[in-house]
Structure formats: structure tokens, C-alpha cells
Image: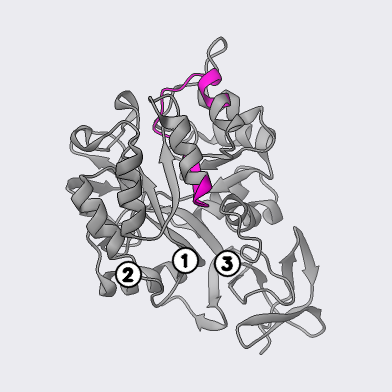
Amino acid sequence: MRLGVEAALVEGRLVPGDVAVDDGRVTAVGLGGAGRGIAAPGFIDLQVNGFAGVDFLGADAAGYATAGEALVETGVTAYLPTLITSAEAELVAALEAVPDSAPGARILGAHLEGPFLAATRLGTHRMAARRDPDPALMERLLAAGPVTLVTLAPELPGALELIDLLHARGITVSLGHTDATAVEAHAAFDRGVRTVTHVFNAMRPMLHRDPGVVGAALVRPEVVVQAIVDGIHLDPDVVRLLWRVAAGRMSLVTDAIAGAGLGDGTYALGEIEIVVSDDVVRREDGVLAGSALTMVEAVRNLVAMGAPLEQALEAASTVPARILGLPQHGRLAPGGPADVVVLDDSLEVVRTLVGEEARVPG
């Protein structure tokens, strides 16, 4: 099957010509013939709390199907359902409910955002459920379901040892919701941590004599910074600064909540009631509580802020795949999986394929 496109993003370059797929794999790129639009690797979102009315802390199989199918329509072909800080019983139940597969976007495992976070940088996370690093608790959570990514604060007692435990189990660790100094952040990076959750948000601010996690991450060329580029979580000039310093190691994430894709209204984030108004998500007290952003919107926003199209598309696909150590994902190349998003000249999603199963936005 041919996709009928005029170009494809292959290894960071737009290669003129059509793309062929067969039996769930890309078979050829750069084929002759007239076409329209661009084929790019399907988007990979590492931080999705919920989508299309579904909150993953309480989702069942039907909820995962609803969210997965809706995510595909925004160009996402793989994602990590993200579970915020909650009581152990809630997290265990939520992890047990994560399916191996579901209709729509691929599930690459769960992202535990907490509970090992700094009390002073919780954002919308519940203080009552926050914990200091606890290997026994971590082991119980790992036994409950498929954990792929854990966000934690490296300055907490026992955090470095917990990082070692997680790395030994093949689980990616990200620094976030943290009041760590640069010294404490560097200690975690020296331990093998290679990414930061929603950079600048819910972490010690970067100051000229106190660079914190942000400064430490930006001077480490091996560290990828994840960013919510919705025009709300980060000022556009901050995004431009990040791009100048960290192009090629900046990963787009949405931090989407259940209301994403549905518009204004009141939704749940676990036990927390949140309100979406004019695409801004807040708790009752005004604290930001995730976003209503989609990945294709994040790509458009990043391009509008000055990033080259090719690199903006990689920030939504290739770079997040690299964070998870998944070289077969986030690439569009012969022999690789046919996880593809087709975009028109306005960067609207025309069609998304997950292993050749196509979906056209409704």
C-alpha cells in the first residue's frame, strides 16, 4: 500500500517521494509519483494523564480503547498512560488495569509520576499521598503492572539508590517535581538519569547563582528535556531559549488530562477536580493541573516558535523514543514499524497508521 505523500521524514531529513507499507512495516521511501502531504514517524507521548474523557487512574479496558482511538486521531501512535501521586492501593489498581494492548495507539507501559516527589514542588499532586523513596513500595508497584518510566525528585533520601534499582530493572528514570540543586541533579545524571520531566515546571527555578535541575540538565549534552509547549506552561521566549540550547534533545509532551480533545468543562484527575477553561487546566485554587494540549498542536506551536519542521517532528517522535531506549520506534525507515502520521501543509493530521491500520480524524 502506498500512502500518496510527496515527502517523508527519514533520519531527520525530508526525503521527496511516496512511502509504501506492507504487513505492518514500512517497505520503501522516496518512491516516484505525485502525492500530497508529509509522512512522519507517529508521535510518541510520554506523559498522558487522560484523554477524550478518560482518566487513566480509573480507566478500564473500554476507557483505554476510547482514549487510544482518540489519541490516534491527533497523530499519536504510542504513549505512556501517566499516573500521578496517589495512595498505594489506587496506584496498584490502576497499574493492574493497564492493558498490554488496546485499540488505537500502542501502550508502551505506564509512567509513574510520583509518589517520590518533593513536598515543596508537588504542583497539583496530593501531599497526603507523597512519599520519600521506598524500595519496598517501589517493588510492589513494579509487580502490579508494566512500569516503563518513573519521575522522582533526586534530592530525597534514598533517591539515588532507588534510581539504581529502577535502572537495574530496565526502567527509565526522569527528574521532576523536585527542589534539587544543580549538585543534586548532577549526582542523578552521573547515576545514569538521562531526562527531565516537563522542564521548568514544578522544579527549582534556574537562577544565576543557583542553576538547579534546569541549568544542570541544559549543560549535560546527554540529557533530554521534556517540555509542554502549549503557550501556557512555558513562555514562547523560554521555548526559544530551550531550543537554542537543546535542539535535538528536547522532547515534546502534552501532560494531557481527561478533558483534552473535549473542550471546556470540569474533569477528574484522580481524586482531584480540575477545570478546563479556554484550553487552560487548573484546580479550584488556580494551580495548573496538566494541559488540554495534543501532540500535533505541540508540533505546530514549536514550529511557530522558530523550530525547523523536521526537528519539531522528531521532538514528537524520535526523541521520546530515544528516552525510552526504543530504536525501532520514532523512525520512518524500510523495515521499521508502519507507525506513521500523514500531515497536510497546515500540519493538520490527515491520516495516522499504527502498524498499517489507518485512521482518518473524524
Residue found at x 56% / y 38%:
193
> Mark 2 or mark 1: which comes first in sequence?
2
Q: Amino acid at mark 2?
A: Tyr
- Rendered view: 176 above or below 52: above
Is the residue under label 1 in contact with that under label 3 (CB below 8 Å)? no
Q: Amino acid at mark 3?
A: Gly
The segment highlighted magenta reads 168-186
The residue pinned by badge 3 equals 42
Q: Nearer the viewer, mark 2 or mark 1?
A: 2
The residue pinned by badge 1 equals 74
- How many marks do you count on the picture? 3
Mark 3–mark 1 distance (CA, rounded to whole Å): 10 Å
Q: Nearer the viewer, mark 3 or mark 2?
A: 2
Q: Is residue 164 magenta?
A: no
Query: Which image quarter is the N terminus in?
Result: bottom right
Query: Which image quarter is the C terminus in?
Result: bottom left
Q: Amino acid at mark 1?
A: Thr
The residue pinned by badge 2 equals 64
The 10 Å Cα crowd at callout 1, few under 14, some 14 to 19, many 20 or more, is many
Task: Please provide percent x and percent y for residue 19.
Answer: 72, 79
The answer to whether 120 appears left or right of 154 in the picture is left
Residue found at x 58% / y 50%:
323
> Splitting the image into 4 quarters, where does residue 117 fall?
top left
Mark 3–mark 2 distance (CA, rounded to whole Å): 19 Å
